[in-house]
Each structure stands twice: as structure tokens, then as C-alpha cells.
Amino acid sequence: MLLELYHPELTEYKYFVNDVLISEGLCNCSVVIKINPGPDKISVWFTPWKIKPIVRIDNILVNYSLANICMYDHMLELSVPTDFFDQYHSADINSRIQSVFGNKPIDPALYDLVIGIGKSHTALIDKIRNILNIE
């Protein structure tokens, strides 16, 4: 997997796994680090302090909260388990459900409209395939 940090002011980084320095160096706005998925604690220190870099994992922009990224003035801490994207997707769906429905009962029609994974839309998909001439 690849972990990318980007910020227009980013100039240096230090990459740690379980508090052991793995690599460090200068960077011009971004750095891409090859990481091994697993339970390890990943820390990326950066310069200058007090910036909030954009984070991508395998070229996918991730939300700090949904990805369980801890932000400090000088570093990010995270863990990237082997099922990271499954966990990220579940956290995304759960946060949408919580923000729309809270503790109220879930309305199935509204759920499909807001969350987008309720009903099967095979008829609509077939119609689009026919229009695009796709088998």
C-alpha cells in the first residue's frame, strides 16, 4: 500500500513504524511512503508543524476521522489494517446513518436516497447498459 501526504508547505518528513524510524527526508509539498498493512502503529512526523496534510491511501483521499487518523501539531498517527478499506467503508456508512437518523427509526426510502446502498438497482443498471450498448 502507498501512504501519501500532501500540503503546499510540506518540506520534511520522518516515517516511524511502532516508534522505530524507517525513513526520513526532504520533500517538495508531498511524500509517498510504501507501507505494509497490519496492526502496526504508523507515525509520520512533518515539517513545518501545525499544518494539516491531505492523506491518501492507495491514491484514495481519506477522511481523518473515518480512517482513525490522530492529528497532532507535528505528526499523524494511524494504523492501516489489512481490511482498511472495508473498515473505512463501514465507518462512512455508520457516520451517514448517525448523522441522518440519529436514534430515530431508519426510513428505508430515505436510507436508500441518502446512504445509497439500500435497494438493488438492477433495472436502472440494465437500462443504462442498453443505452451505452454494454453487455
Image: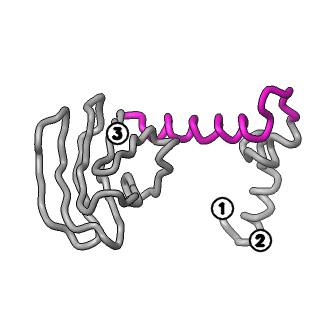
Dot 3: element: strand
Question: Distance between the Cα atoms at labels 3 and 2?
Answer: 44 Å
Q: What amino acid does circle 1 point to?
A: Glu
Mark closer to the observer (2, 1): 2
107 left or right, relative to 38:
right
Question: Distance between the Cα atoms at labels 2 and 1?
Answer: 11 Å
Please tell me which residue is depicted at 80% across the width and 35% down the height of the picture: 101
Dot 1: element: loop
Q: Is residue 19 above or below residue 35?
A: above
Q: Give the percent coordinates (x, y) of residue 72.
A: 35, 46
Please tell me which residue is depicted at 34% across the width and 36% down the height of the picture: 79
Q: Which residues are magenta?
A: 82-107
Q: Residue at label 3?
A: 78
Please tell me which residue is depicted at 25% across the width and 48% down the height of the picture: 44
Q: Residue at label 1?
A: 135
81 left or right, relative to 100:
left
Q: Please tell me the numbered disc located at residue 131.
A: 2
**Pointer 3 and pointer 2: residues touching (CB < 8 Å)?**
no
Q: Nearer the viewer, residue 118 or 52?
A: 52
**Pointer 3 and pointer 1: residues touching (CB < 8 Å)?**
no
